[in-house]
């Protein structure tokens, strides 16, 4: 999960400098309703990233009340780390983290070369194809072997039908996105 958050922070800072509160708000919205990132997770991450030299902190005094605002910006080393994370392959399992990583990577595709975008999409396509093959094989097993209890087998078949349909939609979209990226000028 830490790499996912690193990718997010560096990607957001590729778009321009931001203060911590803004990073936290954007991340809360980006990861969806089921997940939240606390200050207790984000700020230690920002500190580690500063220690590694990937980001730097600049304090700016606000006019109201004389408080200082902490602004984070990406360094050259951070840009290198961002490129490394974007080019890093996925785990070969489709889980919430792999899906989240793909979604974050797609948001920041504009900051990487076309071959990195295509490699990411093609690898995810391969994972989807493997997952659909697994679902189809198990579905076939359930239909031919008809394990007991019958009610559970029928419900399992419904769940696998659901997974297959979702996978087919995702597969179709990824194939279209690969074609769109291939047609783009780099």
Image (cartoon, grey):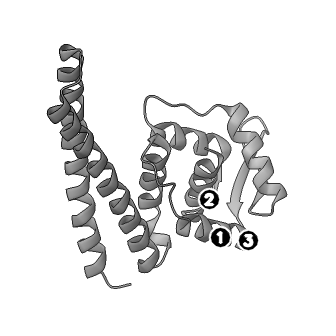
Residue where numbered disc 2 is placed: 10
Q: Is residue 61 visible?
A: no
Looking at the picture, does residue 154 appear above or below residue 62? above
Q: Which residue, as the protein is rendered here, is positioned at the far front?
A: 145
Q: Residue at x 24, y 26 (%)?
A: 156
Question: Distance of mark 1 from mark 2, alpha carbons?
Answer: 7 Å
Q: Residues within 10 Å of mark 1 (few under 14, many from 20)?
A: some
Q: Which residue, as the protein is rendered here, is positioned at the far bottom?
A: 185
Label drawn at residue 15: none
| Whole-percent x, y for residue 86 in the image | 54, 66
Q: Is residue 184 visible?
A: yes
105 left or right of 125? right
Looking at the picture, does residue 117 appear above or below residue 62? below
Residue where numbered disc 3 is placed: 77
Q: Nearer the viewer, residue 156 or 170?
A: 156
Q: Residue at x 71, y 52 (%)?
A: 71
């Amino acid at each position: 999960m830490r790499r996912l958050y690193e990718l997010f922070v560096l990607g957001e800072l590729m778009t321009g400098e931001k203060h911590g509160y803004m990073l936290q708000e954007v991340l809360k919205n980006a990861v969806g309703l089921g997940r939240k990132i606390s200050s207790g997770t984000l700020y230690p991450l920002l500190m580690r990233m500063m220690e590694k030299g990937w980001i730097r902190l600049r304090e700016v005094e606000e006019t109201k009340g004389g408080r200082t605002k902490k602004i984070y910006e990406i360094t050259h080393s951070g840009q290198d780390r961002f490129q490394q994370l974007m080019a890093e392959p996925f785990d070969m399992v489709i889980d919430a983290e792999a899906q989240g990583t793909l979604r974050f990577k797609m948001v920041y595709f504009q900051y990487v070369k076309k071959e990195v975008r295509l490699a990411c999409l093609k690898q995810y396509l391969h994972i989807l194809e493997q997952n659909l093959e697994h679902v189809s094989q198990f579905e076939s097993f359930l239909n031919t072997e008809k394990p007991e209890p019958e009610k559970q087998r029928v419900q399992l078949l419904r769940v696998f039908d659901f997974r297959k349909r979702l996978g087919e939609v995702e597969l179709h979209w990824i194939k279209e996105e690969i074609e769109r990226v291939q047609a783009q000028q780099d």
